Image: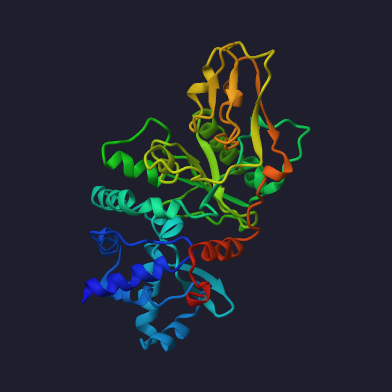
């Protein structure tokens, strides 16, 4: 019976735009069983993306209101469903597995869960990453953009930090997971950033460490100095986190490095440019490009592959001769991300051939 309950929840999660595809050996079911009790899985499988009050959920699912409220609060505390305050008090709804449920397990991840996720990743994650629009989008690091170049708010990591009212940082779950498997990298782990428009939103949070604006900017700089790629959700408005990614641990960028998937992440509106007169062929920049977009010409001048370059700018400040710089791509090469997350979901649902109305 519990097998069927987890299968229903898996199918419900796969009906969301992000996707949660099934695997040949049921790895997704074992992962869900690690996170949800059968009672929680049954209720979660009947939730909608549109948040509802406990009374509305109870009436629709046939549960007693008190029982529904207890289950909903318990699942919210464990990061298994979404909750927000609405006109009727706290309201609850379904949350995608990635980006969503899995990332909320940063404070609960252990070796067992790391192994369960890895089994699922190797079998099914490629299917999630091949769909466009992509889950994440690159935004360039600050030093790589000239002061005279117009940068829209959704294209600037520092701009997102400066416009927020609350800032927090937590350990990157991707690097935690790889460390638990004995396959970790040397990149810093405490650089996963979250933002809010509500002042003091992260005060007292057991997993997220609240930061000041200056501390958040310093964290962003520390990530950039480590050669990490800033990425955000693939929409323009309502951006509330900044991931600092590497191809060795990041679940998304590993799709390129390990699964051989091109375009696993949406590129920025910028592309790297080399000043041939300043480049002395030292090859320093090659060590910092995670996308194999740089190579040396026969004349010992760095060459940029415009197709492979995602416009992260990580290599730019590493050049000792200031020979690298970011420029805007031609307008015909710039694909503007959907405005809102809801817009993104509609486009992705269409690309996957699913009916978004079934889960709203």
For the point 59% across and 65% down, the residue is 342
Between 246 and 37, the one lying in front of the other is 246
Q: Look at 65% across and 56% down and name the residue there.
A: 237
Percent position of residue 228, x then y: 50, 34
Does 137 appear above or below 340? above
* Residue 189 located left or right of residue 271: left
**Colour scheme:** rainbow
Asked if 59 appears above or below 349 in the picture, the reply is below
Q: Position of residue 41 (x, y in %)?
A: 32, 72
Asked which quadrant contains residue 200, the reply is bottom right
Residue farthest along the right direction in this orientation? 148
Q: Nearer the viewer, residue 81 or 99?
A: 99
In x, y percent, where is residue 267? 58, 42
Query: Which residue sits furthest front?
Result: 298
Tell me: 339 left or right of 293: right
Quadrant of the snapshot with the N terminus = bottom left
Q: Could you say which is closer to the camera, residue 217 or residue 29?
A: 29
Give the mark count: 0
- Residue 206 in view of the camera: no
Question: Whole-percent x and y of residue 72?
Answer: 39, 74
**Of 211 and 14, the residue lying toward us:** 14
Any part of residue 294 in sight: yes
């Amino acid at each position: 019976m519990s097998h069927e309950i987890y299968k229903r929840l898996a199918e419900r999660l796969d009906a969301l735009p992000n996707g949660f595809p099934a695997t040949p050996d049921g790895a997704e079911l074992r992962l869900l069983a690690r996170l949800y009790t059968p009672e929680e899985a049954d209720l979660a499988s009947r939730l909608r993306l549109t948040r509802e009050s406990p009374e509305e959920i109870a009436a629709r699912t046939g549960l007693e209101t008190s029982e529904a409220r207890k289950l909903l609060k318990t699942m919210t505390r464990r990061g298994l469903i979404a909750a927000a305050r609405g006109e009727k008090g706290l309201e609850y709804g379904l949350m995608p597995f990635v980006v969503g449920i899995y990332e909320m397990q940063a404070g609960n991840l252990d070796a067992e869960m790391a192994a369960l996720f890895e089994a699922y990743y190797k079998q099914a994650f490629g299917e999630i990453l091949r769909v466009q629009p992509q889950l994440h989008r690159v935004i360039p690091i600050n030093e790589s953009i000239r002061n005279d170049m117009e940068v829209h708010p959704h294209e600037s990591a520092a701009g997102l930090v400066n416009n927020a009212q609350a800032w927090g940082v937590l350990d990157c779950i991707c690097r935690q997971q790889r460390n638990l498997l004995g396959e970790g990298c040397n990149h810093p782990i405490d650089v996963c950033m979250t933002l809010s428009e509500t002042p003091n939103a992260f005060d007292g949070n057991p997993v997220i460490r609240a930061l000041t604006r200056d501390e958040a900017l310093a964290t962003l700089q520390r990530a950039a100095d480590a050669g990490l790629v800033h990425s955000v959700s693939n929409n323009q408005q309502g951006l509330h986190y900044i991931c600092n990614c590497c191809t060795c641990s990041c679940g998304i960028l590993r799709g390129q490095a390990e699964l051989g998937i091109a375009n696993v992440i949406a590129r920025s509106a910028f592309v790297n440019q080399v000043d041939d007169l300043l480049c002395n062929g030292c090859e320093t920049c090659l060590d910092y490009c995670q996308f194999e977009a740089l190579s040396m010409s026969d004349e010992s001048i760095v060459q940029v592959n415009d197709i492979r370059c995602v416009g992260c700018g990580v290599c730019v400040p590493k050049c000792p001769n200031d020979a690298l710089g970011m420029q805007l791509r031609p307008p015909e090469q710039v694909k503007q991300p959907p405005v809102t997350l809801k817009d993104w979901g509609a486009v992705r649902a269409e690309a996957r051939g699913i009916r978004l109305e079934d889960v709203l």
